[in-house]
Each structure stands twice: as C-alpha cells, then as structure tokens.
Amino acid sequence: MKTSFLPFLGGLAGAVLILSACTYSEPVPAPTSFDAAPPPTRSIDNTMRTFAEQGSVAVVAEVRWPGGSWSRAYGVRNLESKEAATPQDQVFIASVTKSMTAVSVMKLVEDGRIGLDDPVNGILESFTTVLKPPGPITVRQLLGHTSGMHSFEEVTEKTADDVPRLMTEDITSERALELTGQLPWDSRDVGFFRYSDSNYVVLGQLVEKLRGRPYPEVLRQDVIEPLKLKHTSLDSAAVAESNVIRGYIDYRNERLDMTKVPGVLGSPAYGAISTMSDVNDFFAALFRGDLVSKESLQAMTKTEAMPLYGLGLWKWNQGCDGSYRYGGKGGFWTYRTASVASTDGRYQATMTLIPPPMPTPLEDPGTQDKINLWDRQMASALQETLDELCP
C-alpha cells in the first residue's frame, strides 16, 4: 500500500503548515448566532454553545430521528477569513474511518476471500518479516484491537521536540509498520485489548492484497459510492476545498494550521474527511443492513476482550428499545468526532469539535485532560439527545 499518512495518538495531523504571529491568546471569533434549539436537542445545543464560548474554532453536529432532523454549527471555517462555519462543512473524522474500513474487511469475509479467524501471517509477507508477530494473528484480532500490537505513534510521538518532524515527515504505511516493528510484541499481550492504529494499517494492506486495488479505491466502491456520500473523501486534494474547517495547534507560541497534511487522508485507520450528514448516512445504512450481512453486523457488534469495542465499532449506552447503540469516535489534536447510532438504523447523532489552538499534549500534558473532558462531554450530549428523542 503506497498511501502515506502521518499519525497522532492524541493527534497531530499535519505537514504543510502556515506559521502565524498569532498565539493561543488571540480571541477566537464569537460563535454564529442561532435561535434556541427545540427541547429534544437542547442538550446537544447547550454543549455546543459551551464549546464555542470556550474559544473553539468550530463545532458542528447533526441529529436524526424518525420523521425529523436537526443540525447546527458554531464558530468559523478558519481563523484567517473568519467565515462562519455551517453544519454541511467537511471535517476530519479521524478514527471513525475505522468503522468504514471494517466494512471493507467484512466484505472480504463475506466473499470468501478470508475468514475472521484466519491468520494474516501467510498472506502479507511484510507482516511476518517486519513486525515479527509472536504467533498467528487473525483478522478478528486486528479488527478488535486484540492482536497485542503496539501503535507506531509510540515511536514517533515522545516529546514536544518531535512536533516539527511530525509535521514534515511523510510516513507511508510500510514505514508505519517498520516503526511498529521497533517495539516489542509480547505474546502475553495477544488476546487483550490494546488500541492501535497499526492494526488498521495492516488491515488496509490486507484489503489491497486481496482486492488487488488501492485501499481508497476499495472503500469508494464498498461504502462511498453505494451510499452516495458526496462529501466523504480520502483524497488529499479534498483539504483544499473552502468548506473544510481548519484545525490548529499552538506550538511554542506559534499558531500552526494543521489542515493541509501531506498524507493523513487515505489512512485506513483515520484518513477520511466527511460531513456530519455523510457520517449519519453511513451508520444508518450499516445498521439497516445495506452494507454487510446480518451475520457480519452481529460479529461487528459483539464485544469480548473489551466490553465497549467490537470489530470497528464502539459500544454506547442502551437506546429506546433497550438494545445498545454503536458508532465511532476518535480524533487528532485538532479534531474530535463522536457518532452514536441505534441498531435499527432510525436514530443517529454525530458531532465534531475543532478545539481552540492549544499546545499539544507533548508540550503541555494538561491538554490531554482537556481533550478527554471534551470527548466525555460530546458522548454524553449525543446519547442524552437520542434518549430524549425516544417515543
């Protein structure tokens, strides 16, 4: 797989950057003004307003339920033009991409190309020679993050001094796995949950190997084109569009635009750009059974080693009918996304937060605490909103 991308545990996203004399202390433009939200969506709207008041660049969301929908945006598309953000704007959806990649993998299983419990060792030569796994590693273990494999960001993201290199180094999937191979792979870790982007890098290579086409092309055929997701892309040229909300960090008192990346787009682990509407379309179709079989969906929603993670899907709280909701979540330092959906395909809620320019966790560990809090607040608002929409 020749796709190149730059990873980030909490997440750096960048390479072509714009330096500005502006620092984190510069006021972020006031949020776009809207009328009061109707009662069922008041929780999510209040959370979004709070994010905006805290200086976030933007926050966008969309909620759907039988017979209705609601969407909203606060903030701006970028800190240079200060053009108002809209609910239809594109953002990086980060690890929500994994749910889409999982669909392409499950289609391989349905087509008889490979089994969920088949090892990949003999299929991908580099898997054995570069990563040196301690034993057979199956497709299921890669999808569910129970392979025990480390993530390559553990090599690339150690101190704040790494940030300039991370912003210019073009890491291919092959290079990502070479970096992963520098870390010990202990047989005692196999079977236990360890979240690792490297798992999905391997799965992207597996998709390419068994389909004979680049991963982005396969995903377009499996997901994007059938669902007519016109605003979802893995093409690096997509970030040049004017409706892409920009993400920023503050690095040693310089504000950096981290949006025009050299290779994040295209990664099977976190490389899609999309809209709230397209993400909701994806999860609605997935749970209606439009993308994979009932058996595949049952496998994807079954949680084992990690009670809250199946195969490419995070498990959320119980919904209106008592069954659990599922979806995706993830982010970089510059984008945080969460999506919650009911398994009957009738309810979806998705939000992306673009935080204010801040030092990365490598420079200021306190930033990670803020990111964790925002993630919890987003998840809570999405689930509370869907709860209030129950009949």
Image (cartoon, grey):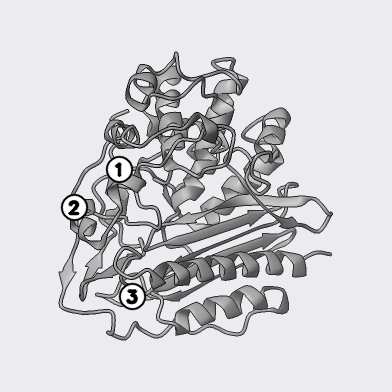
Q: Which element type, helix, strand or loop, lies under badge 3?
A: loop
Q: Which element type, helix, strand or loop, lies under badge 1?
A: loop
- What amino acid type should be assigned to the residue bearing mark 3? Glu
Left or right of 287 on screen, residue 248: left
Viewer can see residue 43: yes
Q: Quadrant of the N terminus?
A: top left
In the image shown, does 379 or 144 lie closer to the viewer?
144
In the rendered view, would you say 78 is above or below 133? below
User: Marks 3 and 2: which is nearer the front?
Assistant: 2
**Residue holding disc 1:** 5
Residue 94 locus on image (x, y percent):
44, 51
**Residue holding disc 3:** 83
For the residues marked 3 and 2, what is the alpha-carbon distance in whole angstroms?
31 Å
Residue 32 locus on image (x, y percent):
45, 81
Q: Quadrant of the C terminus?
A: bottom right
Which residue is located at x 35 percent, y 60 percent? 244
**Residue holding disc 2:** 165
